[in-house]
Image (cartoon, rainbow, N blue to C red):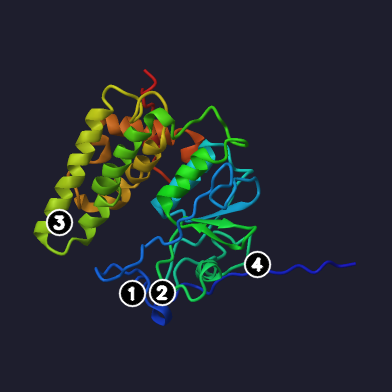
Amino acid sequence: MTVATHAPAYASPVDHVAYGEYGPGRLHLSPGWDRPIYPFQDRVTADGSSGFRAEPGRYHLYVAWVCPFAQRAAIVRNLKGLRDVVSLSYVDDERDGRGWAFRERRGPDPVNGFTLLEQAYDATEKGYGGHISVPVLWDRRTGRIVSNNFPDITIDLATAFEEWADTSVDLYPAALRPEIDLLNGWIHHDLNTGVTRVARAATGADREQERRRVVSALERLDRRLADRRFLTGDTVTEADVRLWVTLIRFDADHNRDHLISERRLADFGHLWAYARDLYQRPAFRDTVEDLPADWDAPHGRDR
Protein backbone atom coordinates (compact mmCIF):
# COMPACT_ATOMS: atom_id res chain seq x y z
CA MET A 1 0.00 0.00 0.00
CA THR A 2 1.38 3.41 -0.99
CA VAL A 3 1.02 6.20 1.52
CA ALA A 4 0.26 9.53 -0.09
CA THR A 5 2.65 12.32 0.80
CA HIS A 6 1.98 15.99 0.36
CA ALA A 7 4.58 18.38 -0.95
CA PRO A 8 5.49 21.19 1.48
CA ALA A 9 3.54 24.40 0.98
CA TYR A 10 5.68 27.37 -0.05
CA ALA A 11 5.01 30.97 -0.97
CA SER A 12 5.70 32.09 -4.51
CA PRO A 13 9.09 33.77 -5.10
CA VAL A 14 9.73 37.30 -3.91
CA ASP A 15 8.16 39.69 -6.42
CA HIS A 16 8.59 43.39 -5.78
CA VAL A 17 6.93 44.28 -9.07
CA ALA A 18 3.70 42.53 -8.15
CA TYR A 19 3.67 43.15 -4.39
CA GLY A 20 5.93 46.14 -3.81
CA GLU A 21 8.40 46.65 -1.00
CA TYR A 22 7.50 45.71 2.55
CA GLY A 23 6.43 48.64 4.69
CA PRO A 24 3.82 50.91 3.09
CA GLY A 25 0.42 50.06 4.50
CA ARG A 26 1.94 47.64 6.99
CA LEU A 27 4.56 49.38 9.08
CA HIS A 28 2.70 52.33 10.58
CA LEU A 29 5.05 54.91 12.06
CA SER A 30 2.96 58.06 11.79
CA PRO A 31 2.24 60.03 15.01
CA GLY A 32 -1.48 59.48 14.60
CA TRP A 33 -1.22 55.68 14.61
CA ASP A 34 -2.62 54.64 17.99
CA ARG A 35 -1.68 50.95 18.08
CA PRO A 36 1.64 49.40 19.13
CA ILE A 37 3.87 48.14 16.33
CA TYR A 38 4.01 44.84 18.23
CA PRO A 39 0.38 44.53 19.39
CA PHE A 40 0.21 40.92 20.61
CA GLN A 41 1.62 41.07 24.12
CA ASP A 42 0.32 38.12 26.10
CA ARG A 43 2.80 36.37 28.39
CA VAL A 44 3.69 32.75 29.13
CA THR A 45 3.94 32.04 32.84
CA ALA A 46 4.99 28.98 34.83
CA ASP A 47 1.69 28.84 36.75
CA GLY A 48 -0.58 29.74 33.85
CA SER A 49 -1.92 32.84 35.59
CA SER A 50 -1.53 34.74 32.31
CA GLY A 51 -3.78 32.29 30.48
CA PHE A 52 -0.77 30.71 28.79
CA ARG A 53 0.91 28.07 30.96
CA ALA A 54 4.47 27.00 30.18
CA GLU A 55 4.28 23.44 28.85
CA PRO A 56 6.58 21.32 26.69
CA GLY A 57 5.45 20.96 23.09
CA ARG A 58 2.79 23.64 23.28
CA TYR A 59 4.63 26.66 21.84
CA HIS A 60 6.44 27.36 18.58
CA LEU A 61 8.80 30.17 17.60
CA TYR A 62 8.77 31.67 14.13
CA VAL A 63 12.10 33.46 13.59
CA ALA A 64 14.33 34.76 10.78
CA TRP A 65 18.07 34.29 10.32
CA VAL A 66 18.42 37.91 9.22
CA CYS A 67 16.51 39.55 12.09
CA PRO A 68 18.53 40.39 15.22
CA PHE A 69 15.42 40.66 17.38
CA ALA A 70 14.36 37.15 16.35
CA GLN A 71 17.92 35.88 16.79
CA ARG A 72 17.74 36.83 20.46
CA ALA A 73 14.85 34.39 20.98
CA ALA A 74 16.77 31.59 19.26
CA ILE A 75 19.83 32.23 21.44
CA VAL A 76 17.84 32.27 24.69
CA ARG A 77 16.08 29.05 23.67
CA ASN A 78 19.49 27.46 23.11
CA LEU A 79 21.05 28.78 26.32
CA LYS A 80 18.15 27.53 28.44
CA GLY A 81 18.17 24.08 26.84
CA LEU A 82 14.67 24.41 25.42
CA ARG A 83 15.22 22.90 21.96
CA ASP A 84 12.96 19.95 22.81
CA VAL A 85 10.46 22.09 24.74
CA VAL A 86 9.74 25.01 22.39
CA SER A 87 9.95 24.20 18.68
CA LEU A 88 11.37 26.66 16.14
CA SER A 89 11.33 27.29 12.41
CA TYR A 90 12.65 29.96 10.05
CA VAL A 91 10.95 32.18 7.53
CA ASP A 92 12.70 33.04 4.28
CA ASP A 93 15.42 35.70 4.39
CA GLU A 94 13.74 37.94 1.82
CA ARG A 95 10.33 39.58 1.79
CA ASP A 96 8.20 41.68 -0.50
CA GLY A 97 5.02 43.58 0.32
CA ARG A 98 3.44 40.40 1.66
CA GLY A 99 5.90 40.26 4.54
CA TRP A 100 7.76 37.21 5.84
CA ALA A 101 7.11 34.00 3.94
CA PHE A 102 8.03 30.32 3.94
CA ARG A 103 10.16 29.16 1.02
CA GLU A 104 12.35 26.20 0.20
CA ARG A 105 15.62 27.84 1.31
CA ARG A 106 14.58 27.81 5.00
CA GLY A 107 11.88 25.18 4.84
CA PRO A 108 8.11 25.07 5.27
CA ASP A 109 5.99 26.02 8.25
CA PRO A 110 6.00 22.76 10.26
CA VAL A 111 3.10 23.70 12.53
CA ASN A 112 0.32 25.18 10.40
CA GLY A 113 1.49 24.77 6.82
CA PHE A 114 1.21 28.52 6.27
CA THR A 115 2.96 29.96 3.23
CA LEU A 116 2.96 33.54 4.58
CA LEU A 117 3.49 34.56 8.20
CA GLU A 118 0.59 36.97 7.63
CA GLN A 119 -1.67 33.93 7.96
CA ALA A 120 -0.62 33.48 11.59
CA TYR A 121 -1.53 37.09 12.27
CA ASP A 122 -4.86 36.75 10.47
CA ALA A 123 -5.64 33.58 12.44
CA THR A 124 -5.10 35.59 15.63
CA GLU A 125 -6.99 38.70 14.54
CA LYS A 126 -9.14 38.49 11.44
CA GLY A 127 -8.23 41.21 8.98
CA TYR A 128 -5.09 42.24 10.86
CA GLY A 129 -3.48 45.08 8.93
CA GLY A 130 -0.43 46.00 11.00
CA HIS A 131 3.25 45.12 11.06
CA ILE A 132 4.17 41.47 10.42
CA SER A 133 7.25 40.89 12.54
CA VAL A 134 9.43 38.13 13.93
CA PRO A 135 9.90 36.63 16.43
CA VAL A 136 6.39 35.27 16.84
CA LEU A 137 5.50 32.95 19.71
CA TRP A 138 2.65 30.71 18.57
CA ASP A 139 0.36 28.62 20.79
CA ARG A 140 -0.62 25.30 19.24
CA ARG A 141 -3.43 24.76 21.75
CA THR A 142 -5.40 27.93 21.02
CA GLY A 143 -4.22 28.31 17.41
CA ARG A 144 -3.11 31.91 17.84
CA ILE A 145 -0.13 34.18 18.45
CA VAL A 146 0.74 34.63 22.10
CA SER A 147 3.22 37.42 21.47
CA ASN A 148 5.15 39.25 18.81
CA ASN A 149 6.60 41.62 21.41
CA PHE A 150 10.26 40.62 21.22
CA PRO A 151 11.41 41.92 24.66
CA ASP A 152 8.76 39.84 26.44
CA ILE A 153 9.39 36.67 24.45
CA THR A 154 13.01 36.32 25.55
CA ILE A 155 12.18 37.09 29.19
CA ASP A 156 9.45 34.45 29.18
CA LEU A 157 11.72 31.86 27.58
CA ALA A 158 14.36 32.67 30.19
CA THR A 159 12.08 32.40 33.22
CA ALA A 160 8.80 30.53 32.66
CA PHE A 161 10.04 27.09 31.55
CA GLU A 162 12.33 26.26 34.48
CA GLU A 163 10.66 22.87 35.04
CA TRP A 164 12.19 21.66 31.76
CA ALA A 165 15.07 24.11 31.30
CA ASP A 166 18.74 24.12 32.17
CA THR A 167 18.46 25.73 35.61
CA SER A 168 22.22 26.23 35.84
CA VAL A 169 21.70 29.11 33.38
CA ASP A 170 19.91 32.11 34.87
CA LEU A 171 19.62 34.85 32.26
CA TYR A 172 17.38 37.09 34.35
CA PRO A 173 18.35 36.61 38.01
CA ALA A 174 16.06 38.43 40.43
CA ALA A 175 18.88 40.29 42.14
CA LEU A 176 20.19 41.68 38.85
CA ARG A 177 16.90 42.55 37.15
CA PRO A 178 17.02 46.29 37.87
CA GLU A 179 20.54 46.47 36.44
CA ILE A 180 19.65 44.29 33.44
CA ASP A 181 16.53 46.34 32.71
CA LEU A 182 18.54 49.56 32.85
CA LEU A 183 21.20 48.16 30.52
CA ASN A 184 18.61 46.80 28.13
CA GLY A 185 16.89 50.17 27.94
CA TRP A 186 19.83 52.30 26.87
CA ILE A 187 21.47 49.58 24.77
CA HIS A 188 18.22 49.20 22.85
CA HIS A 189 17.91 52.93 22.21
CA ASP A 190 21.53 53.91 21.66
CA LEU A 191 22.81 50.82 19.89
CA ASN A 192 20.26 48.16 18.84
CA THR A 193 18.00 50.70 17.13
CA GLY A 194 20.60 53.47 16.96
CA VAL A 195 22.47 51.76 14.14
CA THR A 196 19.34 51.77 11.97
CA ARG A 197 18.58 55.41 12.77
CA VAL A 198 21.99 56.34 11.35
CA ALA A 199 21.14 54.69 8.06
CA ARG A 200 17.66 56.24 7.90
CA ALA A 201 18.53 59.77 9.04
CA ALA A 202 16.77 62.38 6.93
CA THR A 203 19.50 65.03 7.16
CA GLY A 204 23.24 65.18 7.58
CA ALA A 205 22.85 66.78 11.00
CA ASP A 206 20.50 64.02 12.16
CA ARG A 207 22.87 61.38 10.84
CA GLU A 208 25.80 62.91 12.69
CA GLN A 209 23.84 63.06 15.94
CA GLU A 210 22.80 59.42 15.67
CA ARG A 211 26.28 58.34 14.60
CA ARG A 212 27.82 59.99 17.65
CA ARG A 213 25.26 58.32 19.88
CA VAL A 214 26.20 54.86 18.58
CA VAL A 215 29.95 55.44 18.86
CA SER A 216 29.53 56.80 22.39
CA ALA A 217 27.57 53.66 23.34
CA LEU A 218 30.32 51.42 21.95
CA GLU A 219 32.96 53.34 23.89
CA ARG A 220 30.89 53.16 27.08
CA LEU A 221 30.43 49.40 26.72
CA ASP A 222 34.11 48.88 25.93
CA ARG A 223 35.03 50.63 29.18
CA ARG A 224 32.46 48.62 31.13
CA LEU A 225 33.92 45.33 29.87
CA ALA A 226 37.47 46.24 30.85
CA ASP A 227 37.08 44.76 34.33
CA ARG A 228 34.26 42.23 33.96
CA ARG A 229 33.74 39.29 31.62
CA PHE A 230 30.09 40.02 30.86
CA LEU A 231 27.89 43.07 31.24
CA THR A 232 26.76 42.31 34.79
CA GLY A 233 29.69 40.23 36.02
CA ASP A 234 30.81 36.63 35.62
CA THR A 235 27.75 35.08 33.94
CA VAL A 236 25.82 35.65 30.72
CA THR A 237 22.49 37.42 31.14
CA GLU A 238 19.66 38.74 28.97
CA ALA A 239 21.61 41.98 28.51
CA ASP A 240 24.50 40.17 26.83
CA VAL A 241 22.16 38.46 24.38
CA ARG A 242 20.56 41.77 23.44
CA LEU A 243 23.89 43.49 22.89
CA TRP A 244 25.61 40.69 21.00
CA VAL A 245 23.15 40.50 18.10
CA THR A 246 24.13 44.07 17.13
CA LEU A 247 27.86 43.51 17.61
CA ILE A 248 27.80 40.45 15.34
CA ARG A 249 26.41 42.62 12.53
CA PHE A 250 28.41 45.77 13.13
CA ASP A 251 31.26 45.44 10.62
CA ALA A 252 29.49 43.52 7.87
CA ASP A 253 26.19 45.37 7.96
CA HIS A 254 25.67 48.47 10.11
CA ASN A 255 29.13 49.98 9.62
CA ARG A 256 29.70 48.92 6.03
CA ASP A 257 31.72 51.62 4.24
CA HIS A 258 32.25 53.43 7.58
CA LEU A 259 28.69 54.63 7.77
CA ILE A 260 29.00 54.97 11.54
CA SER A 261 32.67 54.88 12.54
CA GLU A 262 36.15 54.70 11.05
CA ARG A 263 36.81 52.05 13.67
CA ARG A 264 35.87 48.43 13.21
CA LEU A 265 34.60 46.30 16.08
CA ALA A 266 38.14 44.94 16.44
CA ASP A 267 39.29 48.47 17.33
CA PHE A 268 37.22 48.32 20.51
CA GLY A 269 39.50 45.83 22.23
CA HIS A 270 37.34 44.67 25.13
CA LEU A 271 34.14 44.59 23.07
CA TRP A 272 35.82 42.61 20.30
CA ALA A 273 37.16 39.95 22.69
CA TYR A 274 33.79 39.84 24.49
CA ALA A 275 31.90 39.35 21.22
CA ARG A 276 34.20 36.43 20.30
CA ASP A 277 33.82 34.94 23.78
CA LEU A 278 30.06 34.71 23.24
CA TYR A 279 30.29 33.61 19.60
CA GLN A 280 32.46 30.63 20.53
CA ARG A 281 29.63 29.22 22.64
CA PRO A 282 27.36 26.88 20.64
CA ALA A 283 24.17 28.61 21.81
CA PHE A 284 25.31 31.77 20.01
CA ARG A 285 27.33 30.24 17.15
CA ASP A 286 24.43 28.05 16.02
CA THR A 287 22.34 31.14 15.20
CA VAL A 288 24.94 32.63 12.82
CA GLU A 289 26.07 31.77 9.31
CA ASP A 290 29.34 32.49 7.46
CA LEU A 291 31.43 34.62 9.81
CA PRO A 292 35.12 35.36 9.05
CA ALA A 293 37.72 33.08 10.61
CA ASP A 294 38.95 35.77 13.00
CA TRP A 295 35.82 35.25 15.12
CA ASP A 296 37.41 31.96 16.20
CA ALA A 297 40.61 33.62 17.44
CA PRO A 298 41.36 33.14 21.16
CA HIS A 299 39.54 35.77 23.20
CA GLY A 300 41.34 35.56 26.54
CA ARG A 301 38.25 36.69 28.46
CA ASP A 302 38.39 33.69 30.78
CA ARG A 303 41.45 35.28 32.42
- Between circles 4 and 2, the one closer to the viewer is 2
- Asked which secondary structure carries label 4, the reply is loop
Q: CA distance from mark 4 to mark 2?
A: 22 Å
> Given the image, on which type of amino acid does mark 4 rest?
Pro
- Point out the image quarter for the N terminus: bottom right
Q: Are marks 3 and 1 in contact (CB under 8 Å)?
A: no
One can see residue 87 in this view = yes
Place of residue 220 in the rendered image (x, y in percent of width and height, measured from the top left) = 21, 34
* Nearer to us: label 3 or label 4: 3
Task: Give the CA distance from mark 3 to mark 4.
Answer: 45 Å
Residue at 65 percent of width and 45 percent of height: 56
Horizontal and vertical percent position of residue 165: 59, 36
Residue at 17 percent across and 46 percent down: it is 213
Who comes first in sequence, dot 2 or dot 1?
1
Q: Amino acid at mark 1?
A: Pro
Q: Which is nearer the eye, 273 or 295?
A: 273
- Measure the C-alpha gap from mark 3 to mark 1: 23 Å
The disc placed on residue 207 is 3
